[in-house]
Image (cartoon, coloured by chain):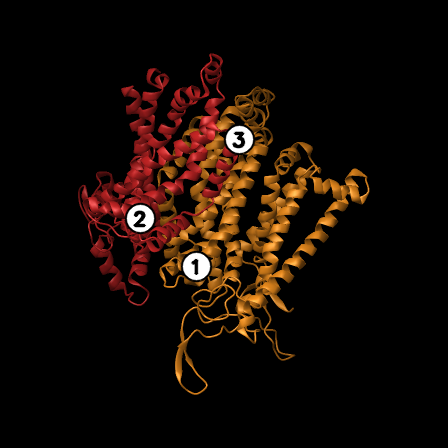
Chain colours: A orange, B red
Amino acid sequence: MPFLPVLLRTDMLLWLLVGTIAGYGFYCAARPHLAAPWKRVFRSPAAMVTAVVLAAFLIVGLADSLHFRPRLPAEPGTPAAYAVKVLSVLDLAVTHLRERVEKTYSAPFATRLYSRQQVELPDGRVAREFPRLLYGGAHLQDEAGHGADVARRVGAAALGAALAWLAIAGLAAVPVARARKRRYGEGWRALWRGETELPWRAALATLLVLMLGLVPLFALSGNYHVLGTDKVGLDVFYLSLKSIRTSLIIGMLTTLVMLPLGVLAGIAAGYFRGWVDDGIQYIYTTLNSIPAVLLIAAAVLLMQVYIDAHPDLYPTAEQRADLRLLFLCIILGLTSWTGLARLLRGESLKLSRLEYIQAAHAFGVSDARILGRHILPNVAHIVIIALVMDFSGLVLAEAVLSYVGVGVDPSTTSFGTMINSARLEMAREPMVWWSLASAFVFMFALVLAANLFADAVRDGFDPRVRVGALPEVKGAAA
Amino acid sequence: MLAYIVRRILYAIPILIGVNVFTFAVFFVVNTPDDVARMQLGAKRVTPEAIQKWKAERGYDKPLFWNAAEGGTKTLTDTIFFEKSVKLFAFEFGAAEDQRDIGHEIRTRMWPSLALAIPVFLVGIAVNITFALFMAFFRATYLDFWGVVLCVAMMSISTLFYIIGGQYVTSKLWHLVPISGFDQGLDAVKFLILPVIIGVIGGIGSGSRWYRTLFLEEMGKDYVRTARAKGLSENAVLFRHVLKNAMIPILTGAVVVIPLLFMGSLIVESFFGIPGLGSYTIDAIQAQDFAVVRSMVFIGSVLYILGLLLTDISYTFVDPRIRLS
């Protein structure tokens, strides 16, 4: 085989989670009563727009979660040897970004380093000047054509992106026309006027914006460092792309821990009441009363002690970093299930007093069956809303925790570590702004999209929003 | 009502015991003092003698729960559990790993923390209420819509960016205030202005949106319809009726965080070099000083529970139904 697949633990869990979500999607699609709230969600343009953005992040993150070790070139006949370094599919796709390491800082699209270096001139004298970059703009014979070259390449890439988008939009009109049993032209018009059931026009518009922004970035990244380089000369664009996986892992895997704890404790407390309720309430009030950051910090410090004491458990640096990431998810999950449990406790307290539950009791249905068949499906909307809402908070928490020093492993690329290493660059003279700006833009886009999507999901799922509060408020204003 | 408060206080005691036992288990049972000593000393200098010496200096060489070597009550009191955990109840924190007295540090460092946290808290509430009222007044218009969008956008920015951006603009670009540091007395003001503003701005997004929801919920109630029906102007309805009633959840929600103001803000204090409890905690975490982290966990829980207690008491003031039942 040309490569040896490597399954990191977080990869496995992430794919498991993605598989579960996909399975849930198919399950819902076949059942109209479960599909209805999702349809309501996606009928809002905000949900469509943010879903496209989130999908872009997810594609990058998932491509970065397929790891392998490439085979080293070897003589025929000798047993295959594999590189020690673990790469991902994303690394493979952006090899040019990963391998073109400059000496130190360089600005976006620059052709020269950002700081003076000792350079030996051809005649033997030593001068201090800004040397040309090894890779950024190396194809230019004459630096005077630099601006024109960038403009030409951006223009060409943008044109290509626009054409590709037109092709996608043209293809998207086919199913629209099919669904209406009309000719292709009418499908195209319906799409264009926003007359489709789901707001596909908004999705396509977002796609256009994304493509116009990202395609030129990718196209130019072969010749320039489009977002500059950091202190050790690594391409900031590459670091930003790598950070996405860390954020997604933290935002998603944490729910794997939080979900079972929160759901089990919450509905058990609300349904059984009595001493079960007292016990569970005691546990989560106690956990809640410890300030979250301190609890996480204490747990992470202890994890460090544990890892230091057992170095043999984690042979490679990658596995250690990966395990630390997984531990961080578990710790975040263990400290954040209490909110979900409290919500579910209240709701199942209310539900368990309703007549249909009492009827089930009267028929002699067992507790386990009542919980599974009658309580759980009726609190599912709260679970879904809580999970989607928590995602953005976890992504933000990662940055803060990494700053405090209890976040991801320093060798793991994440928005937190990017900010942490970039924060002193603002004090430099002249200032290095691009690492921080890149981390800000990528993180802001991810968190904002997640927040807006969460709002749309809440509006689609929350029965109170649907039937009560909002229309009345709107009526009152009129 | 006295019985109610006493009952709430009694309810707080098992929770504090739970926190105490939990932290003890986490800090001493999951990892033994030997592991901690090995990490503190660093891999190179580890010898069994060095570990023993390190433990003896800090009193970690005693048995965990039961000291059979001593007689009388000392079998229980001369143990790690009693010395390091039970004594927290008397607010005796002992010494940090660098041998400085934690109690003294806390007493001196809580004032800078309060000087930062109280203005952030008060100004924050005032600003959030104003902005939320503004959105509620213009509800279901473009002003409201874009206000909410602004809130969500502000929520999506990490605190770190507010701090770094604020420091860059005001200190480096405009040279208005020093970039970080602290001073005694009134001179501290110039160091505190920027952190206070940043603390307030950082909280606007989630705070205002939450208050707006409270206002809108209140506006949907029957008494508001009655007020409108009897011909009150929209202003009178909003400011005299809705605001007053919505203040109940706002204030009771704010009461719970008042005691926690002592703890200070971890990130803001460490960025601005304010010698408060927040930066103390961060330094302790970064130096892996378990004694300090343990003390701060305990104080944090005590303050949180105190906050819950104050919330319960404040309910009895604003809601007579609780007082009478």
Q: Chain of mark 1?
A: A
Q: Position of residue A457 (x, y in %)?
A: 57, 37
Q: Which residue is mark 1?
A: A433
Q: Nearer the viewer, mark 1 or mark 2?
A: 1
Q: Earlier in the sequence, mark 3 or mark 2?
A: 3
In three-dimensional space, the C-alpha distance between marks 1 and 2, rounded to whole angstroms, equals 23 Å
Between disc 3 and disc 2, the foreground one is 3
The quarter of the displayed image where residue B128 is located? top left
Are tags 1 and 2 found on a single chain? no
- Asked if labels 3 and 1 share a chain, the reply is no
Task: Check disc 2 and report the residue beneath it.
Answer: B269
**Given the image, on which type of amino acid does mark 3 rest?**
Thr
Q: CA distance from mark 3 to mark 2?
A: 39 Å
What distance separates the C-alpha of mark 3 from that of mark 1? 38 Å
Which residue type does callout 1 highlight?
Trp
Q: Is residue B122 visible?
A: yes
Q: Secondary structure at mark 1?
A: loop
**Nearest the camera: A478 or B128?**
A478
Query: Residue B104, image x and y in percent?
Result: 19, 46
Tag of residue B141:
3
Q: Chain of mark 3?
A: B
- In which quadrant is the C terminus of chain B drawn? top left
Q: Position of residue A48 (x, y in %)?
A: 62, 42
Other-residue count near label 1 (Cα within 10 Å), few / some / many at <14 / 14–19 / ≥20: some
Asked if A210 appears above or below B224 in the picture, the reply is below
Task: Count neighbours of disc 3 (C-alpha within 10 A) and say few if under 14, some if 14 to 19, many if 20 or more.
Answer: some
Q: What element does badge 2 sit on? A: helix
